[in-house]
Image: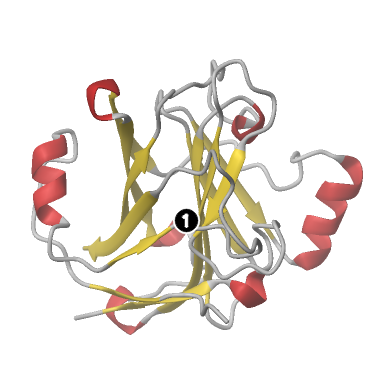
C-alpha cells in the first residue's frame, strides 16, 4: 500500500518571487513530492506528472509546483470563481495538527485564485449538499501567487506564498509547527469535458477532502 508523504520543509533563502529561475534555485535542494492517482490500479492514459515542493521563510509557507501539461487552459476570468470547474488548477490543502478548520487554496495558470476555509467536516458536508462554496469562501484573499506558462516545455509553474495567519487559528511559529497537507490537481484538455485529477496523498478514492489520507508537513529550523 502506498503511504502518504511526510515532507521536511526547510527555511528558504531569499529569492525574487517574480522570477522563475531564482524561485527554482531556491527550491533546488528541497525534497518534493509527486502527484499520482493512488485510488486507481494504474494511471489514466491522459495522466501527466507534476511535482510540488514546500518550504518556509519568515511567517509564510511557500509552495512551488511544476506541472507537465500539453494544453494549459482555463476559462476563469476573476478570482474566487469555481476554478476547478473552469480549467487547469493546482489546489493546496492545509490543516494544522490539532486544529479542526482547514484551508484550501487554488491557483489557475492565469494566476487567478480561490481561497476557502472549512470550519469542520460538517461545513464541508453542507457545501456539498448545497453545491455552494459561499459559507467557506474567503472574500478578502490573503495569499500571494505567481504563475508561469511555458508551452515550449509543455508545462506551467506556480508559486504560492501562504501567510501563517491564513492557515492557523492561533499564532504559530513554523519551525515548531506540524501540518496535514495535500497538493492536488485538475488537468483539463482543450475541447475535453472531464479533467484528469491527481494528488500527492495516498487517496483510496478520488476525493481530495479525505483528511485521514493526507500527508504530513514538518518545518525545519
Q: Is residue 215 above or below residue 125?
A: below
The quarter of the picture where residue 142 lies is top left
Residue 186: x and y in percent read 56, 40
How many numbered discs sit on the rendered protein? 1
**Left or right of residue 124, residue 181 in this image:** left
* Quarter of the figure with the N terminus: bottom right
Q: Is residue 17 above or below residue 190?
A: below
The quarter of the picture where residue 172 lies is bottom left
The quarter of the picture where residue 163 lies is bottom left
Classify mark 1: helix, strand or loop. helix
Q: Is residue 6 above or below residue 49?
A: below
Is there any visible trace of residue 146 in the rendered image?
A: no
Residue appearing at x 54%, y 15% in the figure: 77
The residue nearer to you, when weighing 55 against 48, is: 48
The residue nearer to you, when weighing 175 against 45, is: 45
| Circle 1 crowding by C-alpha within 10 Å: few under 14, some 14–19, many from 20 | many
Residue 169: x and y in percent read 54, 68
Residue 18: x and y in percent read 18, 33
Residue appearing at x 50%, y 36% in the figure: 89
Determine which residue is flagged by label 1: 166
Is there any visible trace of residue 206 in the rendered image?
A: yes
Residue appearing at x 54%, y 38% in the figure: 46
Residue 212: x and y in percent read 65, 77
* Coloration of the structure image: secondary structure
* Quarter of the figure with the C terminus: bottom left
**Left or right of residue 125, residue 175 in this image:** left
Residue appearing at x 41%, y 23% in the figure: 110
Amino acid at each position: 500500500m502506498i503511504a502518504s508523504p511526510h515532507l521536511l520543509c526547510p527555511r528558504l533563502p531569499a529569492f525574487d518571487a517574480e522570477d522563475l529561475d531564482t524561485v527554482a534555485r531556491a527550491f533546488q535542494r528541497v525534497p518534493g513530492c509527486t502527484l499520482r492517482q493512488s485510488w486507481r490500479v494504474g494511471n489514466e492514459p491522459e495522466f501527466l506528472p507534476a511535482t510540488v515542493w514546500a518550504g518556509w521563510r519568515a511567517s509564510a509557507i511557500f509552495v512551488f509546483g511544476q506541472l507537465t501539461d500539453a494544453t494549459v487552459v482555463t476559462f476563469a476570468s476573476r478570482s474566487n470563481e469555481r476554478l476547478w470547474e473552469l480549467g487547469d488548477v493546482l489546489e493546496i490543502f492545509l490543516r494544522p495538527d490539532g486544529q479542526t478548520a482547514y484551508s484550501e487554496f487554488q491557483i489557475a495558470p492565469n494566476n487567478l485564485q480561490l481561497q476557502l476555509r472549512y470550519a469542520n467536516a460538517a461545513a464541508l458536508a453542507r457545501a456539498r449538499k448545497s453545491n455552494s462554496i459561499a459559507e467557506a469562501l474567503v472574500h478578502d484573499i490573503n495569499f500571494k501567487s505567481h504563475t508561469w506558462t511555458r508551452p515550449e516545455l509543455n508545462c506551467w509553474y506556480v508559486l504560492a506564498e501562504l501567510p501563517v495567519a491564513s492557515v492557523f487559528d492561533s499564532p504559530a511559529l513554523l519551525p515548531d509547527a506540524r501540518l496535514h497537507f495535500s497538493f492536488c490537481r485538475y488537468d483539463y484538455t482543450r475541447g475535453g469535458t472531464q479533467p484528469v485529477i491527481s494528488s500527492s496523498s495516498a487517496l483510496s478514492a478520488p476525493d481530495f477532502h479525505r483528511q485521514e489520507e493526507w500527508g504530513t508537513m514538518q518545518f525545519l529550523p
